[in-house]
Amino acid sequence: SYGNSSRTSGVVRTVKDLDQDIAGRDVLLVEAIVDTGLTLRYLRRSLEARRPASLEVASLLARPDEWTDFILPADRERVVAAFTALTGDARSLDLEYRITRPDGEIRWVHVRGFQVRNAAGELIRHAGIVTDITERKRAEDLVRQSEERYRSLIDNARDAIFTIAADGTFTSLNPAVETISGISRAEWIGRSFTPMVHPEDLALAVEMFQRV
């Protein structure tokens, strides 16, 4: 919603300074959320000066009521709810969700939007920016998969694997510890490792721990 267009035609507004570094990132500027072509040109020049990896301009004007069709069905309900709230009491929104491009490719976007009100406090329009974060999401997914593989190896190992804090207390243990010690992992957490060590080996174990 932009209010009465006749009041904003030809007026350049700097609606919001970006608070994120976009250098080297892919940025999508949605034409339907700026006032005029003049404002669009100003925003584009400003963004290009910040050296993004790419800068594309898209328009929702051809199908203004069907923009939700591009949102992945699994994300659509929460996204629509967030944008609906933005037309009411919510002064801003900040969310990530997936969209489907016309060529069928699924991309992740980070959307930040906010209300623009006049001096009387009346809502006159919305403004915001959409950033393509697909590569970041792919990297996060690779990290998650790596962590899951690592966790699987630890959990299925027959040897006892654990982590110990600087004070000598257990912070994590794998299932093999229960098998070897006969004591549940939950009971070991927060306890010193010394009861696990045979008395004849305790002095050496403590010395080695202090060297680490």
Image (cartoon, grey):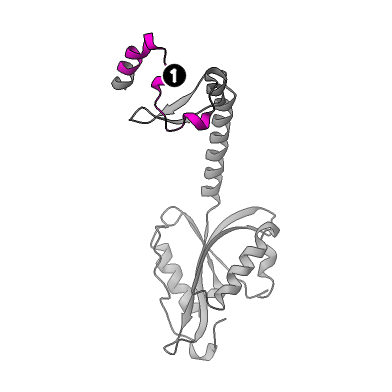
Residue 8 point in image, percent of width and height: 48, 87
On-image quarter of the C terminus? top left
Quadrant of res 44: bottom left
Q: Let me know if residue 49 is in the magenta part.
A: no
Between residues 61 and 73, which one lies in front from this camera angle?
73
72 sits to left or right of 144: right
Q: Residue at x 44, y 57 (%)?
A: 52
Disc 1 marks which residue?
Answer: 196
Query: Is 107 located above or below residue 176 in the figure?
Result: below
Q: Is residue 126 above or below residue 130?
A: below
The image shows residue 78 at horizontal and vertical percentages of: 63, 63
Q: Is residue 96 left or right of residue 48?
A: right
At a point 49% along the width and 74% down the height, the residue shown is 91
- Which of the image's four quarters has the N terminus? bottom right
Residue shown at 53% from the left, 35% from the top: 147
Report the front residue among 152 and 101.
152
Q: Is residue 196 visible?
A: yes
Q: Tell me which residue sits at (43%, 73%) in the image.
A: 42
* 69 vs 36: above or below: above
Of 115 and 31, which appears nearest the observer? 115
Asked where in the image residue 79 lies, by quadrant, the reply is: bottom right
| The stretch drawn in magenta includes residue 204 | yes
Q: Which residues are magenta?
A: 185-207
Callout 1 secondary element:
helix
The kind of residue tagged 1 is: Met
Please, what is the dominant secondary structure of the magenta stretch? helix
Which residue extends farthest top? 200
Is the residue marked by circle 1 packed among few (<14), some (14-19), or many (20+) residues within 10 Å?
few
Front residue (pair 144, 64): 144
